């Protein structure tokens, strides 16, 4: 388990230090925070019964104990606990067991220990912590940790692993000559960089997990933050600010849409319009992630690393969107349609080159991470964009050179984001609270805003022509282009 953030004790409560993430990065995990031990049985004395205080102490201590078993960096393989289950699953289970009792604590009112400070620390530096006297801060921290665990799980799903028999069943086989020392026949694998595999089921699981991560962040934004008093909000660490939570939610949605686009590209029934729509949705989501991220008071090193990741994914999205938009424009009969199509394809090629550059910069920036291979929709587009740009450039020169080339790249169409995470509903109050004297289940610290009922306005869902792109079947692989030549 890797902590990416390390907070410093500053007045704004939010300057972050240098992140650490080992292994391949397919889903960037920008920070883990763990609770630090406090004696709730003593601190809650006089506020709640001894039995309920002991229950809160036991559940919180269990979270701390499991979190301590995890290492400081993200690993490809799951860490196993003594009973054989994964540490990540155990920690998620412990957090979900803690939630019902914690919900009772925050809805019960100020009389239930509102002056108790709940400390949370960053895994990489136990001396840098934030302790705030608010049960809502504790609840916000729990939801943030659940979201981070989901992002880690999605990264694990997308990290290629050796197949059980060591052979990649999806790689195509053929025959080749061995020219030295003698002529012999041999077998070759044409599609594999290594003997590692990533199945469609892994990708479908990753979509579900990314949507789960987005639901945790959305719940924190719409149902917890509105209940936090302003003087506590001012002290929140950077990773729990509204801008950061919004950026993380959009990041999770953006990577889920990216996987959807990959399934659409592999589906012969998916039209160019469907592919363009998904690519344009990607652009919208990643732009929103970037807009929020730049507002977070991050330390310089962390800001650069995280922004490069979002910039890399935004470049991927723009390359795909301009490519499919260009192909659709090329099929039109409007004036200068072919010139506008070529302009879009050239823009797609420029964004593709930018993506390749930023991906390398991201991996080479401290803390260093492995450069992930080109995969998913970009593996297909990295071959097709140069090829189509070169081909359409020649056709334009031969047949449509009289068309007026646009002064600027045509604007991409805008679509409402169709993919939404199912809302994460906080659990009902633990029954133990109903036996507490004076427990009234107060709705909110803010009289005008019922607790956990504030929901953001949801966009109307638009059905895609292909109902479920995650279930789409594969298509034949694209032809390999030996060189990437920019169209002249």
Image (cartoon, rainbow, N blue to C red):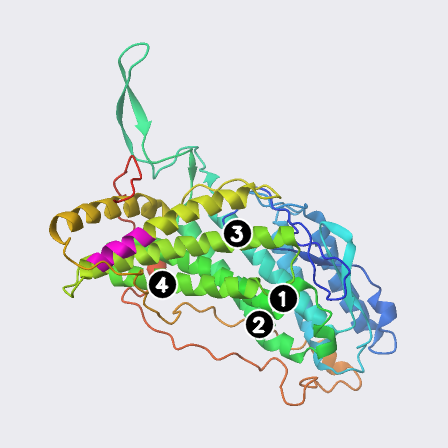
* Earlier sequence position, callout 3 versus callout 2: 2
Crowd around label 1: few <14 · some 14–19 · many ≥20 (10 Å): many
Is the C-beta separation of discs 2 and 1 under 8 Å? yes
Mark toward the viewer: 4 or 2: 4
For the record, the magenta segment spans 339-347
Q: Identify the residue under disc 3.
A: 308
State how far apart marks 3 and 4 are (Cα).
20 Å
Residue 348 coordinates in the image, percent (x, y): 33, 52
Mark toward the viewer: 1 or 4: 4
Residue 415 coordinates in the image, percent (x, y): 35, 70
Residue 297 coordinates in the image, percent (x, y): 65, 62
Q: Identify the residue under disc 2.
A: 219
Mark linked to residue 143: 1
* Residue 322 as seen in the image, left or right of residue 65: left
Give whichever of 287, 6 is nearer the camera: 287
Q: Residue furthest bottom?
A: 448
* Residue 361 as seen in the image, left or right of residue 376: right
Could one spot residue 99 in this view of the protein? yes
Quarter where residue 11 is shown? bottom right
State how far apart marks 1 and 4 are (Cα).
30 Å
* Earlier sequence position, callout 4 versus callout 2: 2
Q: Identify the residue under disc 4.
A: 280
- Magenta stretch secondary structure, dominant: helix
Mark toward the viewer: 3 or 4: 3
Residue at left offset 19%, top offset 60%: 404
For label 1, the SS is helix
* Earlier sequence position, callout 3 versus callout 4: 4
Q: Is residue 282 magenta?
A: no
For label 4, the SS is helix
């Amino acid at each position: 388990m890797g902590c990416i953030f390390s907070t410093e004790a500053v007045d704004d409560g939010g300057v972050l230090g240098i992140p650490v993430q080992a292994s391949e990065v397919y889903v960037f995990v920008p920070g883990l925070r763990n609770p630090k031990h406090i004696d709730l049985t003593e601190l809650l004395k006089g506020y709640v019964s001894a039995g309920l205080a002991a229950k809160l102490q036991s559940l919180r201590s269990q979270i701390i104990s499991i979190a301590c078993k995890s290492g400081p960096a993200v690993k490809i393989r799951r860490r196993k606990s003594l009973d054989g289950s994964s540490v990540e699953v155990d920690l998620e289970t412990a957090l979900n067991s803690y939630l019902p009792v914690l919900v009772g604590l925050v809805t019960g009112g100020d009389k239930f220990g509102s002056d108790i400070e709940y400390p949370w620390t960053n895994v990489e530096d136990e001396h840098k912590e934030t302790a705030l006297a608010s049960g809502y801060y504790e609840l916000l921290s729990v939801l943030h940790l659940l979201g981070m665990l989901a992002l880690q799980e999605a990264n694990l799903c997308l990290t290629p692993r050796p197949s059980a028999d060591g052979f990649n069943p999806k790689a195509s086989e053929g025959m080749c000559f061995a020219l030295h020392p003698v002529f012999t026949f041999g077998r070759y694998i044409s599609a594999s960089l290594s003997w590692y595999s990533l199945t469609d089921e892994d990708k479908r699981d990753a979509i579900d997990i990314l949507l789960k991560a987005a639901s945790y962040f959305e719940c924190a934004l719409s149902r917890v933050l509105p209940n936090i008093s302003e003087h506590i909000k001012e002290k929140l660490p950077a990773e729990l600010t509204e801008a950061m939570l919004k950026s993380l939610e959009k990041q999770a949605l953006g990577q889920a849409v990216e996987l959807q686009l990959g399934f659409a590209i592999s589906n012969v029934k998916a039209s160019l319009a469907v592919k363009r729509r998904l690519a344009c949705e990607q652009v919208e989501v990643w732009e929103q992630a970037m807009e929020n991220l730049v507002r977070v008071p991050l330390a310089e090193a962390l800001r650069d690393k995280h922004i490069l990741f979002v910039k890399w994914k935004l470049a991927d999205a723009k390359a795909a969107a301009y490519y499919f938009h260009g192909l659709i424009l090329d099929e039109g009969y409007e004036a200068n349609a072919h010139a506008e199509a070529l302009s879009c394809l050239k823009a797609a090629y420029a964004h593709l080159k930018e993506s390749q550059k930023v991906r390398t910069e991201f991996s080479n920036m401290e803390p260093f991470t492995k450069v992930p291979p080109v995969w998913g929709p970009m593996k297909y587009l990295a071959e097709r964009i140069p090829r189509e740009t070169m081909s359409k450039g020649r056709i334009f020169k031969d047949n449509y050179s009289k068309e007026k080339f646009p002064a600027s790249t045509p604007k991409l169409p805008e679509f409402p984001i169709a993919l939404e995470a199912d809302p994460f509903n906080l659990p009902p109050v633990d029954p133990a609270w109903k036996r507490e004297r004076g427990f009234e289940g107060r709705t909110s610290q803010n009289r005008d805003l019922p607790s956990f009922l504030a929901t953001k306005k949801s966009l109307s869902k638009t059905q895609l022509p292909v109902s479920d792109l995650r279930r789409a079947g594969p298509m034949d692989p694209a032809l390999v282009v030996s060189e990437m030549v920019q169209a002249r």
